[in-house]
Image (cartoon, rainbow, N blue to C red):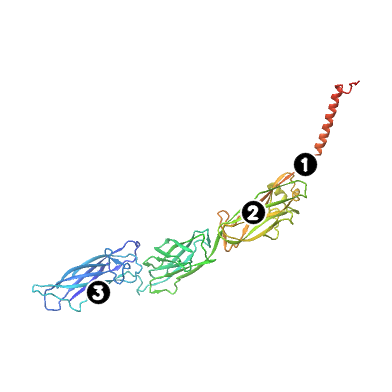
Amino acid sequence: MVEAEVSFSPIQIPTQNVDCSKPLQNTAEICFTMSRLSTVNTAQARINYTLTLDATRKPPSNRAYVGGKREQSGSLTVDLIRKKCSTVKFLVEACPEDALNSLSNELKFKFDGLPSNTNLRPSLAQQAQTATIHPLGFEINCGTDNKCVDNLKVDFNFTRSSEVKVGIDELLNVTVTVENRGENSYNSRVILTYPAGLSYRKFTIQQGRIECNSLDSEDGLSRGRTDCTIDKPIFKSKTKAFFIVSYGIETNTQLERKIFITANATSGNQENATTSEIYKNKWIDVKYSIFMTFENSFSYSNFTFGMDNLQIPVQQLIKVTNDIRAFNFTVVIKVPVKLGEKEIWVLSSLQIVDCQTENDEEPSVKDFVPQIQKDKVVDCSVAMCRVFKCNTFMGRLQSRTYEISGNLSSGWIEQIGLQSAKFLLTSTATVDYDQSQYIYFSTVSNNNPPVRKIIVEVEVYPQTNFTKEIIGGSLGGLAFLALLTAGLYKAGFFKRKYP
């Protein structure tokens, strides 16, 4: 009869490991004891054995190995006198995903009886077990009842972001917090799901031992999935972990008006506290970046001061180009039309094709004369402005030109009191759009669309008065005539006698 025993040192696999990259050392002592069932006093046999580590798992899922393999074979000679032993040194994965279930190590042996002095060979009893299982368990700290009941709480936020700005933001950062308020939690993990259109970039550890892998949506319909292990294999009682998962946002990504991220915490514990908070679902608004370029012409007109009934036809052009994506928007053009009680443009002639007029806007400055005399600018702050709105749909890289046309009047100039000056008659153009869906791409204006100035330079000349010149010229001519006459008289021109 042969009995096999296997003992391990250490007797349990440590689980409080800081460095998961370094495997743990263990030693198995394999012993065989041969006893007799007959009256013979001496017998020997050769035992050939094979120890299979973590035998219930197929490679590469096995958690223990010897020299890269999970099997170790050996042999020894046993007799009836004493127990014979052999040792096998092996390595155990430091932080396996399964730290709850023991390693089931299988020992198999074959018995080969050796001949005695009388040429008798011992044989193995039929009831002898030639294959036995020898478990090696993990350290478990679960209180007196030896039952671990964890209490996980998961939460996350969008890391200082209130909205996803497609075309402006390169990343959406999700900060995840996990807390274990109960007993030790085994094989804890957090699974995040995210919409098609986002792509996993990286994870950043803030606290704890975190490992993440992710799979983006492959068909554009299913959701992506990020799987993160938390302090593998044991997320200890009364501890927290923090990490940031970053998802990329391409400029041409198409998302819903709102997108949501989910977080679900799980563990390998057989029982979880009823107060666990293991699921979160949060939404965030999505806005798409837009960018427009404006080009406009420069116009010039001049008037004579004091002539209040002059009109000059003027055309101003402004070209609007949509640079990023197709969308509906409104071009808003404001034109100064009245200074005090005097018209700047002849209102009946002023028009912008395909645009509608809105209510005129009153100026913020009522005492406009000092400001215009100082700045030489006539805009909507000092003059009443007519508002034109031009609704349009424009594709990417498409352009459209708007023309401000009408007759410019001279009636508003005299009240300023400057007989000679150059005034900048300033209209403006900007864009209006659905701000719940779009955001203007700008590095200098806090994501506000630009306001483009459209200028007519109006030069005023003083009225020419030739009265003094005429009188001076007449008197000068008379004086010259008198001097000429006197000279001729002295020369005797008038005294000459003719035959």
Dot placed on the residue nearer the N-terminal end, 2 or 3? 3
Vertical comparison of 475 with 358: above or below: above
What whole-number distance in Å separates the C-alpha atoms at marks 2 and 1? 36 Å
Q: Is residue 490 in sight in this rendering?
A: yes
* Quadrant, the C terminus: top right
What whole-number distance in Å separates the C-alpha atoms at marks 1 and 3? 123 Å
215 and 79: which is toward the camera: 215
Dot placed on the residue nearer the N-terminal end, 1 or 3? 3
Q: Quadrant of residue 483?
A: top right
Q: Position of residue 255 (x, y in %)?
A: 52, 65
Left-right relation of 342 to 445: right
What label does residue 132 carry, if any? 3
Q: Position of residue 105 (x, y in %)?
A: 27, 71
Are the residues flagged by discs 1 and 3 in contact, CB closer than 8 Å? no
Question: Which residue appears at 20% of the width and 77% of the height?
Answer: 128
Q: Quadrant of residue 72?
A: bottom left
Left-right relation of 343 to 139: right
Are the residues flagged by discs 2 and 1 in contact, CB closer than 8 Å? no
What label does residue 464 carry, if any? 1
Question: Which residue appears at 83% of the width and 29% of the height?
Answer: 480
Q: Is residue 364 in sight in this rendering?
A: no
299 and 139: which is toward the camera: 299
Dot 3: within a 10 Å radius of its alpha carbon, few (fewer than 14), some, or many (20 or more) residues? Answer: some
At label 3, the amino acid type is Thr
Are the residues flagged by discs 2 and 3 in contact, CB closer than 8 Å? no
Vertical comparison of 333 with 284: above or below: above
Q: Please name which of the two marks, 2 or 3, marks the residue nearer to the observer.
A: 2
Q: Quadrant of residue 236?
A: bottom left
What label does residue 318 carry, if any? 2
At label 2, the amino acid type is Ile
At label 1, the amino acid type is Thr
